[in-house]
Each structure stands twice: as C-alpha cells, then as structure tokens.
Image (cartoon, grey):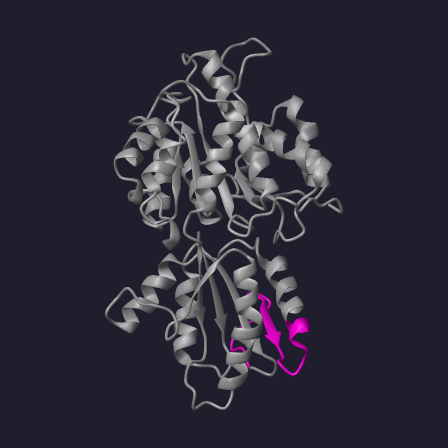
Amino acid sequence: MDKTDTSEVSQTLLNRSFLISGSANRLTDESLIRYAHELIGDLAVDLLSHGGRLVVGAGKEPKQSDDADAPALLFDWTVLESAAVHLDVHGAPAQIAGRPITCVMSEKGETEIPVDRAGLWESLRRNGFLEVHYIRPGARSGAMIRDRQAGLSDVLLVLGGGSGVEHLADEFTSRRLPVIAFDLNLGASRDDGTGGGFRIARMTKANPSEYFGLRPEHQGSAGSLYSLLSTTGGPRPANVLAGATIDLLEKLEKPMVFYTRLMNQRIEAFPRVEDFFRKVVDPLVEAGGYRRHEVGLDRLEQPFTNLAIFENLHYASVVVADLTAERNNCYIELGYALGRPIKVLMTAEEGTNIPFDPNAIPCHFWNMQNETATEIERLRVFWRTNFDRPPLVS
C-alpha cells in the first residue's frame, strides 16, 4: 500500500464508508444488468479515488444463465474487482483510516467463493486492502450480515434487490443515515421484496428528506440533485451517472462525532481537557470530513440537555469519550455509546485511572505538555489503528 494518489481526495467523502448493495433478477434484460455492473464498477473507483471506503459482502456469484459470460446477479464481486484494479495501480489515499475495503461474511460464504475469484480474494487480503468481519461461527444469516454491514457503514447505495435491500434501507433510515437508490428496474435475485431499490428510488423522488439530508448550504436542492441520478428517460453513460452520484454524495450532511468529556470549569483538569479537544481533536475531526457535536458549544435541537445528549449519542457515527477526571456522567455516556453499533474512541489524560481493563477497550492517553503537532499525530495513529475495530454490540 505504498502507492498513493491523493489528487482527487474529497474532504466530504474522506473516510466515509459506502455500502453498495442490490441484485438483479434472471429475467431482467441482460443489457440492463451489464449496465448496472458498469455503473457499480465506476462508482467503486470514484469513491476510492475521493477517499471513501467500501463495504461489501462476498461468497457465491450466481449468474443470469449457465453461459460462462453471463452477467452476475449480485454485485459484490464487481465492487471487489474494480476496487482491486484501481488500488493495484494507485493504492489507497494516505488519509484513509483503516483499510479501504471492509467485507462482512459468514464462514459458509467463504467456502462458496468461486474458483475464478479466489485469486482476486487472496490478492486483496495479501496487499492489505481488505478487512474481513465474520458473523457468529456456524451462522449464515443474511440478516446478521446486513446488520453488521449497516453498523460499519455511513451511506447505503442501492441498485435493484428485494427484501434484503429493503431491510438495509430500514436500518439506515432508523439510524438517520443516507440511502441513495437508483431507479434501475433490475428486480431481485431471489424474486422477493416489495420493489427493492426501484421502489425506494420512487419513494425518494417523492420525499428526498426521508432518505438523505444535505449540508446547510445545499438545503432546498435535494430534489434537483437527486433527479440527476434518474435513468427513466433511458440509461445515461455509466461514468456520467457515477459522477452525478459523487456530486450528490459530496453535498450530504457530514456524519457526526459526539464528544463526551469533562465540562465543569471548576475542575482542575478542565483547561487541559479543553486544550486537547480544541487543539487536537477538533482538527482531526474536521480533516476527517466529520462534524462535531459538543454539548455547551453546538446548537441543540431538543429543549432539554439530557435528552439532547442521549439523542445525539444514539445517532452519532463516532463517539470520542474522554475520561479525564473520572466523571460519572462520562462513564454513563461511554456505556451507552458502547451499547450502540457505532465507533467509539476512548481517551484520557496520562495518569487517569481507568476503572476497567483497558486491554478490552483501548484508551488513548494524551499529554498536552507535548508539542501540539506531536499530540495530533499520536491521536491520528490511534484513530487509524482502532477505526476498524467492530463495535461491542452490533
């Protein structure tokens, strides 16, 4: 992974994880299925080029027919193949935290990897591009895989599919995470569901705010931006549609990092905690393409502080929990965060007594007597090292 091409890296897409999911029905027109694969390949490359990370599944690859050249009905291997070709040439942007591709699968799924995909699978793992998460040993539940994928992702991209993508869309919207569906009428490989991605796309056209939100400066343009993803007038060149998708994704509301920390200014450690968050945490959060939420500094949507704390904790993408001064409220908020399928980074000033095994939950110990640049780099390394740790609850 020593090759890096950062010329296209987008601060709004950097380190955001994109789950691409869907399928096609055997009876769907072959040319439309091939178009979907072309679009997905272009999207995977564009997302990686802009600093995004990909979340997929892996396993068998059913085809539309017994013809060796028939298009696949699932898209995971197209994502992996397109990503591998790009990464072999360009590498991953240096700013990416963790590995550029995360795959969630079952033990059974690993045994079903097609022979002609084994080399690609091994190459991705050998080159350090792929992080693999397995569900419970012996299980092969699609729902368990989707739940884990949702917990590792920031945005869902949907093409076709049936009940599986509908389950994912429900998971993402319940967590206030964006769902971007394409209006390609591909059907579903299992011939199930109530319309899958095609139906979700129609619903999005009628009410975009139900499926994604935009940053304040782009409020009011959701409908026009989403209309540029439409293919109802006939398929547009795949690279053009992929480009329009990237343009929409770059305008999405940034994922939130929630801070839980010492807020009592009468406590002796407060000035050092304040320095740590303002000089070290804030710059990393901003550079990572996130928006922060800190009670007392950032705007509350709720009338009561306690309600605001737990609602924002509930919907955060990342929680930075600092335990300096061992405040009870911080432990309560940390416990709540650990019970959510989100990323949690635990920090504390050097010398803080952590009242549980730090080997089970890694903690970054900081010291603001060091140079600020040194502390930023130390936290960056900790962030990158622990970014792909699975949540305690998923």
Q: Which residue of the protein is positioned furthest toward the top in this rendering?
A: 67
Q: Quadrant of the N terminus?
A: top right
x, y percent for residue 223: 32, 38
Residue 300 shown in magenta: no
Residue 356 shown in magenta: yes
Residue depicted at x 45% and y 80%: 262
x, y percent for residue 83: 62, 34
x, y percent for residue 89: 72, 36
- Considering the whole magenta stretch, tell me its main secondary structure: loop
Q: Nearer the viewer, residue 147 or 88?
A: 88
Q: Is residue 354 above or below residue 340?
A: below
Residue 139 visible somewhere in the drawing: no
Residue depicted at x 72% and y 41%: 127
Q: Determine the image quadrant of residue 180.
A: top left
x, y percent for residue 34: 51, 18
Q: Which residue of the protein is positioned furthest toward the left in this rendering?
A: 303
Residue 213 visible somewhere in the drawing: yes
Residue depicted at x 50% and y 77%: 323
Q: Nearer the viewer, residue 47 or 55?
A: 47
Image position of 216 (left or right of 75): left
Q: Is residue 298 above or below residue 71?
A: below
Q: Nearer the viewer, residue 325 or 39?
A: 39
Q: Is residue 198 above or below residue 8?
A: above
Q: Determine the image quadrant of residue 205.
A: top left
Image position of 174 (left or right of 371): left
Q: Which residues are magenta?
A: 353-375
Residue depicted at x 50% and y 79%: 274
